[in-house]
Image (tube, grey):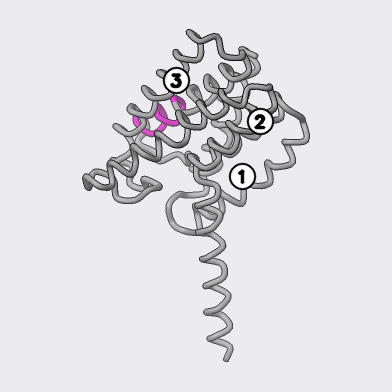
């Protein structure tokens, strides 16, 4: 009976970790945050556009890579699969940013996309130059939270509690070390926050 109880507890913990990893996935967080930003600045159409560039297209690229057997899973857990992917995503986000600038999108949405671009660039540099799989999950979670706090309301800082939970899930599932989730969160928050504040 005791062994069964321990097994049940482990199952619950594993399921919780998996749920947090899926809900806190970068593409999910980017879509939700983009829509919130769009509504907050009175430009829901641009919110949809950014959601597509920062969430839908990136996941589409990952799924295409999985179908071609170039990417093993939708969280891209192998570091050697991340290098080219990050370059492709940087090009996608940069293209979206150019469209925003040319079409005179609200400065807040341009700053939001720029913040994501810089945060992704920082993650790419750490991953490629140092060959260290910094957590994009915690980077996006912390970065988006800081930007929403700057752009919408300081109350958004309360949602920072989600970042360590997401980080725990990534460590529990064996996809990252503690250092990788901590550095990811700090890099994402600083890169995104400073970029947004300097533009908006």
The correct choice, above or below, for 180 with respect to 94 in the image is: below
Label 2 – label 3 distance at C-alpha: 21 Å
Whichever of labels 1 and 3 marks the residue nearer the N terminus, that label is 3
Whichever of labels 2 and 3 marks the residue nearer the N terminus, that label is 3
In the image, is 58 to the left or to the right of 33?
left
**Which residue appears farthest toward the bottom when viewing the image?**
1
Whichever of labels 2 and 1 marks the residue nearer the N terminus, that label is 2
Residue at point 22% right, 47% down? 69
The numbered dot on residue 163 is 1
Considering depth in this image, is 142 or 181 the residue closer to the camera? 142
> Overall secondary structure of the magenta stretch?
helix
Q: How many residues crowd mark 1 within 10 Å: few (<14), some (14–19), many (20+)?
A: many
Q: Which contiguous range is marked in magenta?
A: 121-129
Residue at point 37% right, 32% down? 130
The correct choice, above or below, for 125 with respect to 58 in the image is: above
The numbered dot on residue 96 is 3
Label 2 – label 1 distance at C-alpha: 11 Å
If the image is split into quadrants, where does the N terminus sit?
Answer: bottom right
In the image, is 101 to the left or to the right of 57?
right
In the image, is 46 to the left or to the right of 93?
right
Q: Disc 2 designates what residue? A: 146
Q: In x, y percent, where is residue 47?
A: 57, 27
Local SS, label 1: helix
Q: Is residue 128 magenta?
A: yes
């Amino acid at each position: 009976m005791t062994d069964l109880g321990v097994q049940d507890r482990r199952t619950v913990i594993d399921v919780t970790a998996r749920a947090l990893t899926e809900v806190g996935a970068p593409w999910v967080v980017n879509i939700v945050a983009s829509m919130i930003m769009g509504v907050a600045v009175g430009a829901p159409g641009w919110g949809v556009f950014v959601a597509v560039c920062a969430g839908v297209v990136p996941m589409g690229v990952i799924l295409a890579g999985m179908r071609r057997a170039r990417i093993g899973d939708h969280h891209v857990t192998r570091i050697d699969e991340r290098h080219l992917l990050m370059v492709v995503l940087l090009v996608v986000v940069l293209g979206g940013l150019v469209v925003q600038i040319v079409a005179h999108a609200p400065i807040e949405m341009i700053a939001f996309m720029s913040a994501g671009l810089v945060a992704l660039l920082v993650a790419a540099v750490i991953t490629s130059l140092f060959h260290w799989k910094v957590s994009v999950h915690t980077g996006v979670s912390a970065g988006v939270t800081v930007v929403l706090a700057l752009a919408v309301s300081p109350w958004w800082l309360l949602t920072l509690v989600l970042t360590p939970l997401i980080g725990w899930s990534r460590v529990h599932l064996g996809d990252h070390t503690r250092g990788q989730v901590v550095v990811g969160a700090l890099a994402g928050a600083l890169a995104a926050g400073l970029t947004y504040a300097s533009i908006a």
